[in-house]
Image (cartoon, rainbow, N blue to C red):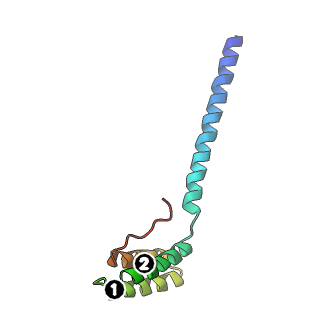
Amino acid sequence: MQRFSISLMGVLLGMSLITAAVEQSYAKVADAKVAITRSERCSDLSRQFDEALETHAAATQVTAAKALQRKGNRFCANKKQAQGIRMLANALKLLGVTPIDPVQ
């Protein structure tokens, strides 16, 4: 009976350690996803576009890319960050630049 109690305690201890480890890993994933707001993402993409424009000024679709950037910035300013982020990402793609993903 004493062996059974010791075994049971060992199993319960092991399960609690596993549960704690899983909870910590979920917390880290949640922190990584919440680390940047949509407004910050708008600012980051707009800044990345400005930098990319300096190096890719000879791209064939610069005018269209600038128009998308203006639309994206307007969406971001009007509390429609999801649409703004898409517009800014598409503007970068027109310049031939891959948008930098903050969660890498």
- Image quarter of residue 18: top right
Q: Name which residue lies at 53% across and 84% down.
A: 77
The one nearer the camera, 100 or 31, is 100
Q: Which mark is residue 88?
A: 2
Q: Is residue 77 left or right of residue 16?
A: left
The one nearer the camera, 97 or 36, is 97
Q: How many marks?
A: 2
Q: Residue flagged by tag 2: what amino acid is it?
A: Leu
Residue 35 visible from this viewpoint: yes
Residue named by callout 1:
62
Q: Secondary structure at mark 2?
A: helix
Image x and y of residue 23, in percent:
61, 45
Q: Is residue 57 left or right of residue 50?
A: left
Image x and y of residue 63, in percent:
33, 89
Residue density around tag 1, few if under 14, some if 14–19, many if 20 or more, within 10 Å? some
Q: Name which residue lies at 56% across and 67% down.
A: 36
